[in-house]
Image (spheres, rainbow, N blue to C red):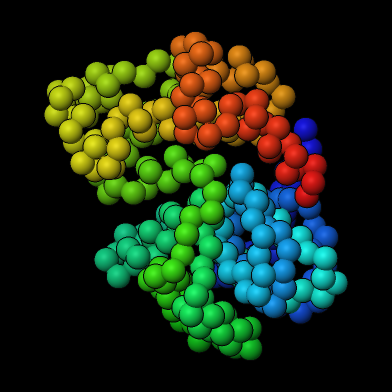
Amino acid sequence: MTEIQQEICPITGEDLFIILDRPNVKFEYPIHCHPEYEINVVINSNGTRVIGDSEESFSGLDFVMLGPYVSHVWKSEQENNHEITIQFSGDLLNFHIMNKRLFMPIKQLLMDSMQGLHFYGEEAERIKDEIMDLTKMQGFQTATKFLNILNSLAHAPRRKLVSNMYESEILIHKSRSRRISKVCRYIEENISHKISLSDAAGLVNMSDSAFSHFFKRQTSISFITYVNNLRVAKACELLANTSLSASEICYDCGFNNKSNFIRTFTKRKNLTPIEYRNHISQLLIKY
């Protein structure tokens, strides 16, 4: 399979963010990812955008925010495309300030961007203008402007998630419960093994019934659904990035048999594992 390239971004540890204003881009770079967050604005252009397992056409203004390691590429037949890109640390979500009440909307924005976010409508046009203003600024005022842009995006009413390839990666951050975080880490570390409700409940000293209700109240989904979602997310990663067979991936992701794996995967992705791999392969070859 063609591999997704990992881009080395020019940001350094001393930068809060970098902004790149490129009025004459040909979109020649192949599909890629990087450990930084990215806000990408394409102005007065048209073409195709690929994010994760999503492929969509765009025209006019295309305004997207991406989380760390989300694969992406833009393609257009136009020779001169205007693109403005803001990149900033992939560790921002873990900064202590993100746990303060005023920053909670931005924290949620960062979590949602792990599936890719597309902004549209009048608010996207207004924030695009703010970003264009930022390209002309220098000094400390750029920091406050950057945070204002993140806050505006966090409250933007017209936006949608782009890809469902990474959906299970964000749940661990959605709850501020230490018990939920402990259980989610346990699941991630043992995803290839049998994981029972009783084992998870025992980790946080709760009965099976109490833990089941607690988990659903905190995360909005059942424990079993979460485990299966994480198994499918892991399967997506292996299908996209390795040559392992579907049978090997089935057991590597903790499914007890291939039939259950195919049934669970197809229900969530609307594609069988092999169809999903072919879809991702075609995207990689095409872009």
Viewer-nearest residue: 191 or 81: 81
- Residue 265 location (% of width, % of height): 51, 27
At x 61% / y 84%, what residue is drawn? 132
In the picture, residue 110 is in which quadrant? bottom left
Left or right: 112 in relation to 219: right
How many discs mark residues in the rendered view?
0
Given the current orientation, which residue lies at the most extreme right position?
79
Left or right: 100 in relation to 126: left
- Residue 116 location (% of width, % of height): 54, 55
Left or right: 192 in relation to 12: left
Q: Is residue 136 above or below residue 11?
A: below
Q: Is residue 252 above or below residue 124?
A: above
Viewer-nearest residue: 33 or 257: 257
At x 67% / y 70%, what residue is drawn? 59
At x 53% / y 34%, what residue is drawn? 270
- Residue 287 location (% of width, % of height): 78, 49
